[in-house]
Image (cartoon, rainbow, N blue to C red):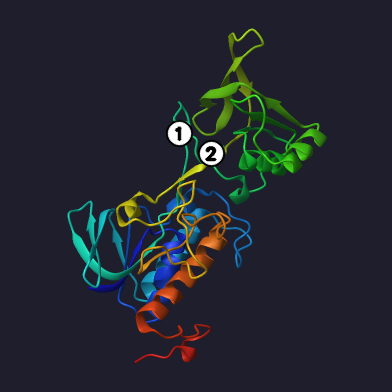
Amino acid sequence: MYELIIIGAGPAGLTASIYASCFGLKTIVIGKLIGGQMTLAPDILNYPGFSEINGQELTNKMLEQAKKRGGEILIDSVIEIAKIEGGFLLKTEQNKAYETKTIILATGVERRKLNIPGENEYVGNGLEYCAKCGKFDYLGKTAVVIGGANAAAQTAVQVGHSASKVSIIYRGSDLRCDEIWKKHIEENPKIDILYNSVVSEIKGDGQKVTGVTIKSKNTQNQEEIKDLPVDKVFIEIGGVPGTALLLPLGVAMDQGGFISVDERLATSVKGVYVAGDVISHKYSIEQITSAVGSGARAASLVFSYLKQSTAPTLWGSSQIKRG
């Protein structure tokens, strides 16, 4: 039986593995995609220690460090979790079973997709799901932001500082964002809004995005179709938390489907902890840095739970007490 199984191999899961290994816990990470959503970021400018790094490079560095510390990484998907005496039984897609005393769920959030032609082809080549992770290469360029809530509004304002033109494409008749963001949008003459509209296709030249096809309803409720040339497309329509695995255990969740935790990142089920974007928004800002922080904290709290003592300090190897 493992002392800890970490489900999810994104920044939260890999960090939890690094810390768990340093704490001397018998641990395994099970995840289908090493790096998770982080691998989709073409350029990351706000991760401490790197003035600029792309998501795949940062993933490789985290993975290398996790393995160097002795972490066991398994590329597989957990499909079922059941409570057993003394812990939990996990079954995977590859028909394997693992027992563990504790769990850290770090499955993150999968960005909602439009599922339209051209979307998959141009991810990272003009199409992004997170402007906050992106390089500021939209200076003087045209962009569209798809969505109408806070994330879309914030992206439009951010991109609008340097882009020549930003169009918000929203299927509703009024933005659902906070008033402060509406004010910023109204004050920027470079930002316009196309209401009652959807993007039906992402167009490109085979290398990068060149435009979008937009379907709109006019005042007579008639459909109009037009092509809009653009350099950048930002899809900001929310995400789906990977929490379904914990439903059979009865773990408490908030209205958005994110997991409710206490200040110890513990769930309502004893022995189950969470880290990363899957946590209720009270504790997460959906950034790599917050995922890493929660991964380290979750591993420390699992150690305290298992050993009934405070986790050792990890500033340096000389401060790690073993045995």
Q: Amino acid at mark 2?
A: Asn
Label 1: which secondary element? loop
x%, y% of residue 236?
Answer: 57, 39
Q: Which numbered tag is attached to residue 121?
A: 1
| 102 to 246, vertically: above or below | below
Residue under the image location 54 percent in, 48 percent down: 42
**Residue 271 lies in what quarter of the image?**
bottom left
Q: Are marks 2 and 1 in contact (CB under 8 Å)?
A: yes
Q: Is 240 or 128 nearer to us in this picture?
A: 240
Q: Residues within 10 Å of mark 1 (few under 14, many from 20)?
A: some
Residue under the image location 46 percent in, 84 percent down: 310
x%, y% of residue 299?
Answer: 43, 73
Q: Residues within 10 Å of mark 2 (few under 14, many from 20)?
A: some
Residue located beneath label 2 in the image: 125
Residue 139 visible (yes or no): no
**Residue 171 lies in what quarter of the image?**
top right
Q: Quadrant of the N terminus?
A: bottom left
Q: Amino acid at mark 1?
A: Glu
In this rendering, would 124 be left or right of 148? left
Label 2: which secondary element? loop
In this rendering, would 312 be left or right of 290? left
- Determine the CA span between mark 2 and mark 1: 8 Å
Q: Quadrant of the C terminus?
A: bottom left
Q: Which numbered tag is attached to residue 260?
A: none
| 8 to 298, vertically: above or below | above
In this rendering, would 144 be left or right of 7? right
